Amino acid sequence: MLSSQLSLAKNVQISSAGELAKLKDKSLFRYEAYVNGNWVKAATGKTFDVVDPGTLETIGTVTDMDASDVRKAVDAASTAFASWKKTTAKQRSVLLRKWHDLIITNKDDLARILALEGGKPLAEATGEIMYGASFIEWFGEEAKRVYGDVVPSPFGNSRLVVLKQPIGVAGIVTPYNFPNAMITRKVGAALAAGCTVVVRPAHETPYSALALCELAQRAGIPPGVINVVTSSLYNTPDVGGELTTNPAIRKVSFTGSTPVGKLLMKQASSTMKKISFELGGNAPFIVFDDADLDTAAEHLIACKFRNSGQTCVCANRIYVHERVYDEFVDRFVALVKEKLRIGHGLDEGTTFGPVITARGLEKVEDQLKRAVNSGAKVVLGGKRPDLKVAGHFFEPTVLTNVSDDVPMSCEETFGPLCPIYKFSTEDEVISRANNVPVGLAGYFFSRDIGRIFRVAEALEVGMVGVNIGTVSSEVAPFGGVKESGVGREGSRYGIDEYLNIKTLNIAF
C-alpha cells in the first residue's frame, strides 16, 4: 500500500541533548549504577552506549557492570535485609507512599526520559509512569495487609499459627518495553513484603531505572534496600547467571522471552530459588458475529499497536467471524489511518513510535516476508516509512489471507504486524486460539452472555479481556499459563511471591 495512506507526525529533527535540556530536574538523568545508596562505577571502569531508537543517536553512556560488581550489590542487599525485614509494615508503607508521591511529582521528566530511550510517544510514556506509580501505591497499602492464620489444631494442648515472612534478597531482571512499570510492579511488592532487591534493567533502557533510584533515595528508602546494576548486552549472560545462582539471592523475578526464561529457570534451580516469571505471549483477539464492531476495532488499535506492538499482551492473532470479516477489516483499516501518526516519541502529534531494537525490526520484516510469500495480502502499511529521522520505524501493518502455519501465526511478533484471520464456528476458533505453547492473555468480543462464559473459560490463558482490549491494572493478578510463565504480579496475590509461609505448632 502507498505510504501516503498512513499519517506522519510533524517529522521534526529530535536531538538527545535538546530533549535532556528540557528536564526540569536534570539530576534524574543518572549514568552510574546504584548500589548500597551510592552512585558507583563498574570496577573495570567500562561503560556502554544507550541509543535513542527514534534517531539512532547515542543518548549517553552508562556503567557496564559484570558479575563481580553484582556480587557486591548482592552483599549490600543481604546486609540491608537484616534490618529492613524488621521494619514494621507501617514504616514500609510510609516510605513507599513517599516514593510514589515523588514519582507523580516528577512524572513529566520521567516520561521524557522514557520516551527518549524507549521510543514511546510522550503521552504513552506518561501513561506508563502513572501506571508504574500505581503499583508502588498499591503495594504500599498491601504491606499492612499481609495476614497470617490461626488454624484449629487436632490436639487440645496446642495451637497452630501461620506466619508470612519476607523471603530475602530478590534478583529482578526487567525488559525494555516497560522500563518503569516492570520495575515498580516487582520492586513495590518486594519492598512491601520486607525484601531487598538487586535489579538488572534492560541495557536498552537503563535510565528509567536509575531515575527511580534517585527518587527512592529522596524518599528515604535505606541504603542497600534497592540496588540497580546496569550492564551491556555483552555482560548480560554473566550478570544474569550471578543473579540466578548466587546463594544469597532467594527469589528471582523475570519478565522477558520464553527461551531466556527457561534458561534462567534452569540456572535458578541450582539453589532452588523461588521464581515468578512473566514470559512471552501470542494473544488471540476474537471478534464474533454478534460483537459491536466499532468497539472491537477501537480496542484492537490499542491492543495491537500500543508501544508499536511491543507488549507481551498485544493482540498477535486476530480472528474475525466470516459473516462480519470484510466489514470489520474495512472499519479497522480506516481507524488505523485516522488514529495513528508515525514519528519520534517526542515529536508533537506522534501516536506511533519506533521498534526499540534493530533485531526486533528485522524480525518484523522477516515474518512479513514469509507471510506474503505464503499468500498473505498486505492491505495497509508493510514497509519502513519515509521519515527524516533514521530510527527503527515500521508502518502499522494489516494483513489478510494469512496462513496458520507461517511464523507470524505461530510465534510472538513483538512488533506492528496485524494479521486478520477468518473463522466459521466457536469451537474452531477456540481450537486455533489455543494451538500455541504459550498462554498469557486473550481477548474476545461478543454480546452473547452464554458465549462469554464458555469462551472465557475455554481459552488457555492467564488473563482474558471480554469486550475490552486491556487486562492489566495494579489490582488485578497478572501472569500466564503454559510456557508464558509462573507466578502472578500485581494484586493481592503479587506480594505473596516475596513471602515464605511458616507454621508454628505451639504446645502448652
Image (tube, rainbow, N blue to C red):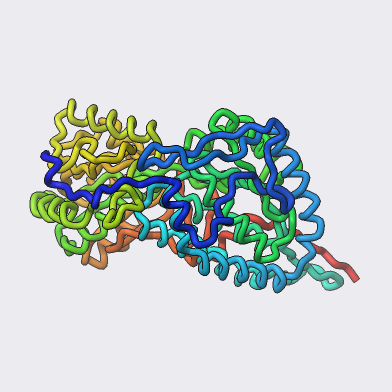
In the image, residue 27 sits, relative to residue 259, either above or below, namely: below
Residue 101, horizontal then vertical, whole percent = 56, 70
In the image, residue 462 sits, relative to residue 45, either above or below, namely: below
**Which quadrant would the C terminus be assigned to in this image?**
bottom right
Residue 263, horizontal then vertical, whole percent = 56, 32
Q: Is residue 419 left or right of residue 51?
A: left
**In the foreground, 207 or 450:** 207
**In the foreground, 287 or 400:** 400
Q: Residue 220 occupies which quadrant of the picture? A: bottom right
* Residue farthest to the right, as pictured: 508
Q: Is residue 146 visible?
A: no
Q: Residue 69 occupies which quadrant of the picture? A: top right
At x 16%, y 34%, the residue is 376
At x 83%, y 73%, the residue is 156
Residue 397, horizontal then vertical, whole percent = 21, 42
Q: Residue 55 occupies which quadrant of the picture? A: top left
In the image, residue 178 sits, relative to residue 102, either above or below, namely: above
**Which quadrant would the N terminus be assigned to in this image?**
top left
**In the foreground, 79 or 459:** 79
At x 24%, y 27%, the residue is 370
Residue 221, horizontal then vertical, whole percent = 70, 62
Q: Is residue 282 visible?
A: yes
Q: Is residue 360 left or right of residue 332?
A: right
Q: Is residue 434 left or right of residue 288?
A: right
Q: How many marks?
A: 0
